[in-house]
Image (cartoon, rainbow, N blue to C red):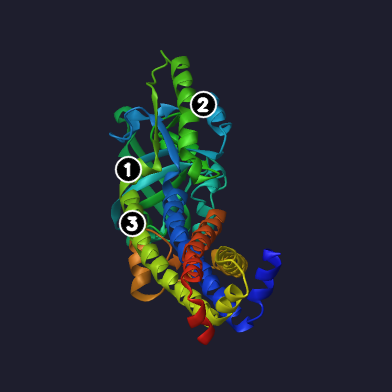
Amino acid sequence: MYVKLAWRNIWRNRRRTIITISAIFFAVFLSVVQRSMKIGSIERMVDGMVGSFLGHVQIHQKGYWEEQNLDNSFSDSPALRKALQNTEHVQAVIPRLDGYVLVAGLERSRAGLVMGIDPQAEKALSDPEQKLIKGKYLANNREEAVIISEGMAEYLKLQVSDSLVLLGQGFQGQTATGKYLVKGIIKMSNPKLNKSLVYLPLKTTQELFAADNRLTAYCIRLKNARKLELVEQAIQPQLEKIAQTNQGQGDDAYEQINWKKMAPEIVQMIDADKQAGKIMMGVFYMVLGFGILGTVLMMASERRHEFGVLISIGMRRFNLGVLVFLEMLMLATLGVLVGMIISLPITWYFHLNPIALRGEMAKVVEEYGMEPVLPFSVDPSIFTTQAIIVFFLTMIIAIYPLIHTKRIVVIDALRS
């Protein structure tokens, strides 16, 4: 009976009900949109670094990260690569052989990073083919051709089909020299990489550095970045097992480094952003809470005479309080559901079509190596968390009508 009475009561005054539901709806809608934008920015920041260069986890020979040179490379292990690929939550394992060289054109030269890649495997991580602005992508692992970054091409005054010379030090001090055809030019979002990066097929890179069958890293991309710790725990026994098998073959133990250690400045930036977001959300909830409280006060004030009549004809104050609480429960449920239903397609649209930043803001974002867009996240936890917070915030505010019914003076209420 109380449920039926509560449902009928909220629709006796449609204007008041719509105002209350609208207040709750806007609370859910604005909190979901704000949080979606914040989480989306953080995810894009992480994915920008992971997707363009690092990987969620990298496997090296022990000591490589402290001293990054070819002497700390390791032999490619099909057994290890298979074990890594079969690990739960791992999407792809990408082999690389990196080295620093002098890159020379006809008139100029510049220090650069040569990244030896498997053209097909690399599509699962940095995907250079999608970043091509001129020329064609690498065809196979042994092709005598390179893809260079846009900044490097401009500085060296190189075009597609020109020749490029690489000069450096190879494995165990051997001289590394080679002349290659510029097959394509790519544009990297990271400004530093855009000025210094050279992609070279993996086998060709191993020949250049006299590092036959050697790699500097396995880059691991995960299906879900939130599973990072689980994957690290699963990988460590595999590394120890393979290392024991390889004892006596010249390779030391392996080490795994996650993206948080490889890019600590990004972690600091994310932490600062999260703290600022918590403060903003706290202020936001406070403002929204007072907005909802205002509508509840209005409802209680308008129904003061009605409450007085109900008490005067014998309705117990406790039962009246329960009835009013049920009404607020229904209003909160309706407001939250409407907020979630309307916010979902809007956040989904901006997830697929991020808002493009322009002007000075775009330049600032590009300096951090990220695409100048404002992305949105559609993580289900965003919707459920914000809906639950607003729902319970409304329920806390609904305590006021309960107290109000306890304190009503019947004579004064009937006169109002």
Where's residue 208, x and y in %? 40, 37
Q: CA distance from mark 1 to mark 3?
A: 38 Å
Residue 346 lies left or right of residue 244; in this view the side is right
Q: Which residue is mark 3?
A: 275
Quadrant in the picture for residue 88: top right
The amino acid type found where label 1 is placed reads: Tyr
> Label 2: few (<14), some or many (≥20) within 10 Å?
some
Q: CA distance from mark 2 to mark 3?
A: 40 Å
Residue at x-position 53% and y-position 71%: 24
Front residue (pair 100, 240): 240
Q: Which residue is mark 2?
A: 80
Residue at x-position 57% and y-position 55%: 380
Quadrant in the picture for residue 371: bottom left
Comes first in the chain, label 1 or label 3: 1
Where's residue 350, x and y in %? 54, 68
Can you see residue 62? yes
Comes first in the chain, label 2 or label 3: 2
The amino acid type found where label 2 is placed reads: Leu
Comes first in the chain, label 2 or label 1: 2
The quarter of the picture where the N terminus appears is bottom right
